[in-house]
C-alpha cells in the first residue's frame, strides 16, 4: 500500500519503499550535519550522537494467530497501525470493544458484527493474561 490517510495524519506503515528511505534519510542528515559543522569551522564528526539508537534492519512482523477475525484485524487495524502496536495492547474484551469503538469514531470501517468478531479475536489472542 501507499501512504494512506488516517485520523491524525498520513501513515507510511504499509508503503513498500519505506525501508529504502531510512538509509537515504540518514545519509542526508549526516551530509547536513557535516556541512553545518564545516560552516562553523568545526571538524566534522563521523559518529552518531550517543542519544540516537543505531539503525537496525527491520524484522518482519510476527504473523497473527489463525482464527476468526484475523483477516479483519490485518485489513482494518493495519491501515493506520503496525500489528505490533495492536497486539501489544493486551486488553480485556470490554477494553478491546472500547478501543475499537474509538477507532471507528476516528474512521475505521467496521460494522457492529465486525467489531464483535475483532474484539473476540483480540481478547482471545492478545488479552491481559
Image (tube, grey):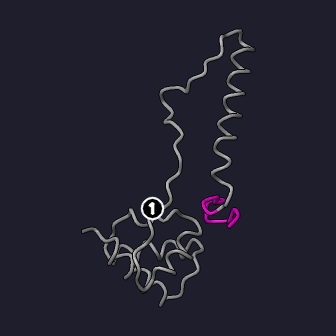
Quadrant (top left/top right/bottom left/bottom right) for the C terminus: bottom left
Kindly identify which residue carries mark 1: 84
Q: Which x, y percent locates residue 97?
A: 40, 78
User: Which residue: 74% across, 21% down?
Assistant: 35
Q: Which x, y percent locates residue 25?
A: 68, 40
- Label 1: few (<14), some (14–19) or many (≥20) C-alpha neighbours in 10 Å: few
Query: Residue pushed farthest left?
Result: 129
Quadrant (top left/top right/bottom left/bottom right) for the N terminus: bottom right
Q: Which x, y percent locates residue 45?
A: 61, 18
The stretch drawn in magenta includes residue 5 = yes
32 horizontally vs 6: left or right: right
Q: Which x, y percent locates residue 34?
A: 69, 21
User: Which residue: 75% across, 14% down?
Assistant: 39
Count every numbered label the image shows and give the total: 1
127 horizontally vs 53: left or right: left
Query: Residue pushed farthest top?
Result: 41
* Above or below, comparing residue 83 to residue 50 in the picture: below
Of 71 and 79, the residue lying toward us = 71
* Above or below, comparing residue 1 to residue 27 in the picture: below
66 horizontally vs 23: left or right: left
User: Which residue: 67% across, 10% down?
Assistant: 42
User: Which residue: 42% across, 86% down?
Assistant: 68
Q: Quadrant of residue 26?
A: top right
Of 41 and 65, the residue lying toward us = 65
Q: Quadrant of residue 96?
A: bottom left
The stretch drawn in magenta includes residue 45 = no
Of 65 and 4, the residue lying toward us = 65
* Above or below, comparing residue 5 to residue 45 in the picture: below
Q: Quadrant of residue 86?
A: bottom left
Q: Which residues are magenta?
A: 1-14
Numbered disc 1: secondary structure: helix
Amino acid at each position: 500500500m501507499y501512504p494512506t490517510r488516517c485520523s491524525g495524519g498520513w501513515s507510511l506503515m504499509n508503503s513498500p519503499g519505506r525501508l529504502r528511505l531510512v538509509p537515504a534519510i540518514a545519509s542526508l542528515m549526516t551530509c547536513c550535519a557535516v556541512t553545518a559543522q564545516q560552516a562553523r569551522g568545526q571538524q566534522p564528526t563521523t559518529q552518531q550522537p550517543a542519544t540516537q539508537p543505531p539503525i537496525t534492519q527491520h524484522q518482519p512482523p510476527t504473523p497473527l494467530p489463525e482464527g476468526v477475525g484475523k483477516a479483519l484485524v490485518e485489513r482494518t487495524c493495519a491501515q493506520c497501525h503496525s500489528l505490533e502496536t495492536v497486539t501489544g495492547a493486551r486488553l480485556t474484551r470490554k477494553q478491546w470493544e472500547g478501543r475499537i469503538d474509538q477507532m471507528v469514531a476516528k474512521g475505521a470501517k467496521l460494522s457492529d458484527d465486525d467489531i464483535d468478531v475483532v474484539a473476540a479475536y483480540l481478547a482471545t489472542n492478545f488479552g491481559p493474561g
